[in-house]
Every structure is written in structure tokens, then in C-alpha cells.
Amino acid sequence: MKSRLVGLPLVLLLWALPARGQSVASSGSERDSLAGLSAVSIVVIGPSPEAERDGLTGESIRTDVELRLRRAGIYVPIKASETTLPKPSLYITADTWRGNGMYAIALRVQLQQLMNSLVTGKPFLGSTWERAGIVTVGAKNLQDARGTLGDYIDQFVNDFRAANPSRRR
């Protein structure tokens, strides 16, 4: 009985969220923060080893994101020497939980850039663009989460293009 009570709030939370994650229109400040970017590094965090064994790998996520960015004309550095200076980084987080043949996946795409504090003038990393949501899929359909992630990357690309009209392909 106790496991039912613990799992019930999680199920209700997931049920209340959209199945394909959240879709939010970009604010002007989010879009404006992408103006003038010349390169974006990619950092993938997750998924769990269990999700990787079931077919959703960090490498497949990185490849999907990198291909979408490159097709859009956004430079993605490959060599370590190309990333020695702090570059804006697109953090892709895929936190996964498995239970009863299903996965709940918390996806987040977040651009972090070096910024300066208005108070101290000191630099810090800050998030200037973000999309996040929760997706539920069957364990055998784990790859379906990549579709939602692709939607988030497409939103990033669209905002990047809007903020950098001279760099359109």
C-alpha cells in the first residue's frame, strides 16, 4: 500500500503535464541573448545507465543535437583546443526514471553563456535560453523522447535565426 501512495503523486504530476513536454513561445530577451553568437558547444548530461541500455544514449542525443545545429549553420566546435575559451554551451539534460515498463524523462535544453554581474562586474555563467518538459514513454519506445528534444532544438534554431538574420542559410 505504501508504494502505491508514494507513486500516486508522481503519476498525477506526470498525467497533468503535456505528453510532449512544454512548448513555450520565446521571450524577446531570450531570443536577443542569441544575437551575435558564432559557436555553441554541446554538453549532454544523462541519461541513466539503465536508459542507455534500453536505447537512449548520451551519444545519440549529442549526435541529434549537433546535426540539427550544423544544418542550421551554427558552428559546433569539436576539438578540445577549440573550446578552451568559455563559449556559450547548450546543456542537454535527460533525467530518466523507470517503473512498470515506462520511463519518465525530464528533458531540459539550456544555453549558458558567460555574463557580467551588474553589481560586481565579475563574470559568471548564466542561463539565457531554456526549454524543459517531462515526457512519458514505454520502455520499448524510449527513442520517442528524441522527438521532443528535437522540437526544443528546432525552437532554439528558430530563435537563433531570428536573432541573427544575416547568418540565415
Image (cartoon, rainbow, N blue to C red):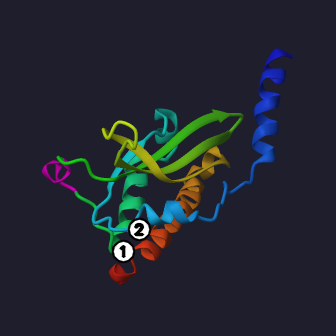
| Number of marks | 2
The residue depicted at 32 percent of the width and 58 percent of the height is 40
Asked whether 139 falls inside the magenta stretch, the response is no
Determine which residue is flagged by label 1.
Answer: 71
Instruction: Where is residue 71? Give x, y as percent.
Output: 36, 74
Measure how far apart labels 1 and 2 are at the Cα level: 5 Å
The residue depicted at 82 percent of the width and 29 percent of the height is 8
Which kind of residue does numbered mark 2 sit on?
Answer: Arg
The picture quadrant where one finds residue 45 is: top left
Q: Is residue 48 above or below residue 73?
A: above
The residue depicted at 52 percent of the width and 39 percent of the height is 51
Q: Is residue 82 above or below residue 3?
A: below
* Residue segment shown in magenta: 78-83
Asked whether 80 falls inside the magenta stretch, the response is yes
Label for residue 68? 2
Q: Quadrant of the N terminus?
A: top right
Which kind of residue does numbered mark 1 sit on?
Answer: Arg
Instruction: Where is residue 61? Give x, y as percent.
Output: 43, 53
- Closer to us: 72 or 58: 72
The picture quadrant where one finds residue 106 is: top right
> Is the residue marked by circle 2 packed among few (<14), some (14-19), or many (20+) residues within 10 Å?
some
Q: Is residue 49 above or below residue 137?
A: above
